[in-house]
Amino acid sequence: MEIELQEIRDFIAAIPPFDRLTDDVLNALTAALSIQYVRRGGDIPAKENAPPTLHILRQGAIAMYSGKDNLMGMLGEGDICTSFCAAEVMPDFYIKATEDTLLYSIPCDELSRLVEQDESVLHFIRHSAAQRLKEAVSDMQEQSSSNLLHTYAGDICRGELITADPDTSIQEGARLMSEHGVSSLILMQDEEPVGLVTDRDIRKRCVASGLPVSSPMREIMTHKVTSLNASESLFDALLVMTRQQVHHLPVFDDSGLKGIITTTDIMRQEGLSAVHLTNTIRKAESLEALVEASRMLPRIQLQLTNMGADLRHVGFAVTAVTGAITRRLIELAEADLGSAPVPYAWIAAGSQARREQTSHSDQDNGLIISDKMQPGDDAWFESLARFVNDGLDACGYVYCPGDVMASNPKWRQTVSTWQGYFEKWIEQPEPMALMLSSIFFDLRVIHGKEKLLNRIRRKILRQAPKNQLFLAHMVRNALTHRPPLGFFRDFVLVHDGQHDDTLDLKHSGLVPIIDMARIYALAEGLHEVGTEDRLRAAAGTPSLSKGGSANLLDAFEFISNLRLEHQAAQIRNGDSPDNYMSPKQLSKLEREHLKDAFKVVQTMQSTLEMRYQTDRI
Amino acid sequence: MLSWLFNLEYKRRHLLDKAPEGPLREYLAKPFPDRNTPIDEALLLAMDFETSGLDAKNDHLLSVGYVTLQNNRVSLETAHHQIIHSKRDMSEDNVTIHHITHDQVAEGMTLPQAVEAILCQLQGKVLLAHHAAVEIGFLQQACRNLYGIAPVIPAIDTMQLARQRLERRQQPIKAHELRLFNLRKKYGLPRYQAHNALMDAIATAELFLAQLAHGNYRKPPPLRNFLLRP
C-alpha cells in the first residue's frame, strides 16, 4: 500500500472487527479496496451477478429491505455491510442508498484470503448473527476470568483440614481450633463428616447457655451440613451461604472431604457480600433499620458487576436481599398483628420470582390464603399487606404502577379464587387480561406455605400446554415487544423506520426473551421460573430446538450484561440505575453484537408467530 | 464540428512518426481509447501533480499520484505515488502546502524516470484530472524538454465538466465554486485531511464518479461526450 493512502487505512482500522488486524494485513486490505459512489436512490450492487462483496460505508447511508418496503436495517458512516457475503442472499433482499454514498468495497473471497490469520474477522464475514453472538458471549466470559466466577471452591479451601471426633469435649475442640487458628471444626465419624461446630456455636450453644465445656461436641454441632463441590465457583459458594444463612461450607471432591470455606475466605477474595447484608436485614428491629440496609443494595450490585458477575449471580444476590427484606417486614408485621388466622403464602411475581431483579425495581406481589379462610380473616391479611407494601416502598421498591400488590384485594385471595383466575385466563384468554396476568405466570413463594402455590401451579401446568388458543394469545402479547432493527448513526432504528434516541434494554431487549421463555415453559408444562432455567429446560422439546435455546441464552446473557454494566456505571456516578442507553454510549463492537442479539430474538419471534398463527386470532 | 476529436487520433499518428525511440514513442504507438466507448467501460487514469508553481515552463514537478478508474470503480490496487527529484530549489510556500520536505524530494525519482513511468501508465488510457491544464501542461513541457516534442493527451477535466453543467443551467458561477473541495462537498463526498498527489487523484476520481451518478443518464454516454477540447 502506498503510504499516502494512510487516511483511508486509518478509517478502516478504526472499525471493528478490522481494528484487530495487524498493520500488514490492514495495508493489504486497503490496497485491495475499490471505491464506488452510489447516488441517493441508487441500488447496491449496481449490477446484477456481482461477486459476493463486502462494503464499508465511507460516507452516506443505505437501507436494507426484504421484499417490498420491508425495512430490515440501515447503515451509516463507518458501518459494514456484510449482507452480500453470505453463501446465499435472500432472493427478495435488496439495498438502496438513502443518501449519496461512497463505498469502500472488497470481494469477500479476497478479504477472506487477506484475513485468514484472524479468526474473528473471518467469522464476522462468514458467520450468522447467532454464531457471532455466541463468540461475543464466550469472549466476555473469558475476560472476567480473575473473579469469583472463575475461582473454584477447591482452590481456596483451607488445605489443613481440622477434624475431630463428635465425642471430643467442647474444651478440647476449642483448644484445637485455637491452636490451628480456625473458626470451625468438622466432626468425623467412620471417615464421614457428621457435623460442624463453629466459634459461634461454642459461644451460643455452650458458654451462653451454661453447658459444661466437658460435654461432647456432638451436643452443640450442626447436623445438617450444607456442603459444596470442589468444582463449584466461589459465586456458587456465596449463593449457598446467602440462601442458607451460613458462614461455613465444607468442600468435597471425589476423594471426600477436602476442606472448608468461610465467608471470610470469600470476602478476602472480593470485598463485601450480600451474605452480610441479608444478615443485617434479618436482625433489623425497625423499618428504619431495613431502609438503611436496603440502601446498600446498589453498592452490592455495583460490586458484583465489578467482579464480573453475570445476571444469574447479580439477580440471585439482589433477589435474595429483596426476599430477606420482605420476610423481615412480614415478621415485624406478625409481631405486631399476632399470628395469621389461617395459613398463607406471600408470593412474589415478575422479576423477583424469576430471580432476575437488579437494583430496586417495582414491587409485584400477592397473597395466597388457605381455603380455610373465614369472612372476618381478611382484615388481618389486609393489615399485613399494607405494612409490607408500604415497607417495601420505603425500602426503594416502589409501589407497582399496575397495582399488582397484596394490598389490592384482587391479588389477596384464597387458593380456590386464584385457581379460578388462572382457569379463566387459560380457558377464555382475552388479550388485556393476559397482558395483566402474564407476570402471574412467574411466581415464587417468599414467605409462608409453599404448597399453597404448588396447588395452583400444578393446575396451570396441566391446563396450559393443552390450550392452543391460550398459548396463541400469550404469543401475540409477547410479540408486542419487538427488538429494534439495529442502529443507524446515533439512533435506534425501530420497525416502522422510525428513530429512537435511546435503547430500552429491558423492553426491547430482555422482555421479548423473558416472554418467549415463559411461553415455552407453559407450552411444555415446565415448572421452571427463571428465564435461563426455562430456556435450558425447554431445549430439545417440540417448542424449542436446542440451537434456538442456545441462541436465546446467548442473547439474554449479552443484553443482561450490557444492562448490568450500564447500571453499574450509573451507580458509580451516583445516578439511579435505569434501562435506557443512548447508542452513543455503545461501542461499535457492542452495537454489532446487539444487532446480532436482536436478530436472534427476531428469528425466534417469527418462528412463534408462524407456529401459533397469531394473525388468525 | 467534432473535428478536434478526429484530430486527436490523427495528431497521435502524426506525432508518432516524429517521436524519437523511447517512452514517448511507446506512448504514442498505443491507440487512444475509442471515442465511442461507453464512459463506464473506458479506462481512465486519474492523476494529480504537485508542482512548485503554475508556470509549466519555469516551475517544476514535485510529485505525482495516480489511480485507475473503470466500471465505475476506483481501484486502490493501482494507486501509486511518486516523489520527483528536482535539482532546482523548492519555493518555500509550496513546501508548506504540500508537506513535501527536501529530504523526501531527494529520495524521489529523477524527472526523466518519472515522466517515463507516467507515459507508460497513460498508454491506452484517458487522463482524468481536476483543472487538467496543469497536468497536461507540465507533462507536455517535460516531454518537450526531454524528447523535443509534446504529445497529445486525451483528457477529461472534472472542473470543466462542473463548469459546463453550471453554464448549461445558466447559473452564475461563484468564486471557488469549481474548486475540488467545494465540488466534493456538493456531492456528499468526504473531506480528506491529507493533501498529497495521490489522495487528490483519488478525490478527483471520486468526484468524477459522483458527476456520472448525478448525470441522469439513461445509459452510459460515450467517452467523446466527456473529453476535454484541446
Image: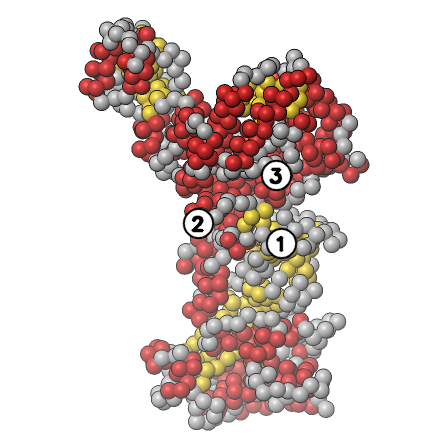
Classify mark 3: helix, strand or loop.
Answer: helix
Return the x and y of residue B213 as percentages of the image width and height: 67, 71
Closer to the camera in the image, A505 or A114: A505
Dot 3 amino acid type: Val
Q: Nearer the viewer, mark 3 or mark 2?
A: 2
Return the x and y of residue A237 as percentages of the image width and height: 40, 26
Distance from the alpha carbon under mark 2 to that under mark 1: 25 Å
Dot 2 amino acid type: Asn
* Picture mark count: 3
- Mark 1 — residue? A500
Distance from the alpha carbon under mark 3 to that under mark 1: 18 Å
Have a look at marks 3 and 1 and say if they share a chain: yes
Bin the neighbour count of mark 1 within 10 Å (Cα to Cα): few under 14, some 14-19, many 20 and up.
some
Residue at 54% x, 60% y: name it: A78
Q: Mark 3 lies on which chain?
A: A
Q: Can residue A302 be seen in this view?
A: yes
Residue at 64% x, 85% y: name it: B163
Give the vertical position of A51 relative to B76 (above or below): above
Q: Which of marks 2 and 1 is in front?
A: 2
Bin the neighbour count of mark 3 within 10 Å (Cα to Cα): few under 14, some 14-19, many 20 and up.
some
- Mark 3 — residue? A511
